Amino acid sequence: MKFSQSIAMITGAGSGIGQAAAIKLAKEGAQVILVGRTRSKLENTAVEISRITGAPRPETFAADVTSEKEVEQLAEHVHQQFGDLHVLINNAGGSSQTRIMETAASEWDQVQSANLKSVFLVSRILGNIMADGSKKEAANPNRKNRAIVNVASLSGHQAGALIPHYSAAKAGVINFTRALALELSPFGIRANSVSPGFIETPLTQAGLENEQFVKAIEKNTALKRVGKPEEIANIIAFLASSDASYMTGSDVLADGGWLIM
């Protein structure tokens, strides 16, 4: 299996793309650490992973990844309980709908924190654990695969209507990932991002209950449908695996052909 003897952390693992990514990595042999704000959602993911794989329920850690203190506590837990980290998936995020001229500074800050600051904090703090592990293996020609995958968005390429804060944050994630890839390259740690289009997740649930919204997506997407979390999870698993060993600083756009229409 691609991730046997690998420790992988997924933020926002309680639902949607994060949950699908955690299940995919676990099925491929990873020892997964599930991170998110809501413990009950994480436990549901853990139960599902155990049911699918037949393995014991994976570790869960409830944390707000926009809080430096809580991310430091998370890192300390990983260091004490696991001693290393090979794969990091930054998926936590969220949004609201607003117009620029009507957006309160507090709302702007909240969305930036959820989608961009969280990626920075987790990458910096947990990335140090990954770098330390890589240093210990420096003399080993069979050094373990190590990778970070950040979940960006189609909105980081083309600003979405009524989500200026989210669009700006996700564009930031794409460029931050490039900077991260350059800085971590001496440690053999790769960093890439994936930019999903319209996917069936809690973030899009309200819109997808609107028949006109769904028809608009089908009309303006080359593949004429909404994507599934599992389809993005497959891309995440590829980017995190040694199959993508010569990829770093890249963004994979998975929008069903939205931008070519």
Image: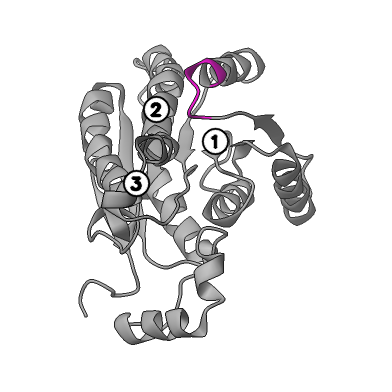
In the picture of the structure, the residue carrying the numbered disc 2 is: 123
User: Depth check: 235 or 36 in front?
Assistant: 36
Query: Image quadrant of residue 147?
Result: top left
In the picture of the structure, the residue carrying the numbered disc 3 is: 103
Q: Quadrant of the C terminus?
A: bottom left
Disc 2 on helix, strand or loop?
Answer: helix
Determine crowd level at label 3: few under 14, some 14-19, many 20+ residues with C-alpha closer than 10 A: few
Q: Is residue 67 above or below residue 115?
A: above
Question: Distance between the Cα atoms at labels 3 and 2?
Answer: 28 Å
- Give the x, y percent position of residue 35: 60, 35
Determine crowd level at label 1: few under 14, some 14-19, many 20+ residues with C-alpha closer than 10 A: many
Disc 1 on helix, strand or loop?
Answer: strand
Q: Is residue 245 visible?
A: no
Residue drawn where x is 62% and y is 47% of the image: 26
Asked if the magenta segment contains residue 63, the reply would be: no
Q: Is residue 9 visible?
A: yes
In the picture of the structure, the residue carrying the numbered disc 1 is: 8
Q: Which residues are magenta?
A: 65-70
Question: Distance between the Cα atoms at labels 1 and 3?
Answer: 36 Å
Determine crowd level at label 2: few under 14, some 14-19, many 20+ residues with C-alpha closer than 10 A: many
**Residue type at mark 1?**
Ala
- Give the x, y percent position of residue 218: 39, 84
- Give the x, y percent position of residue 88: 46, 35
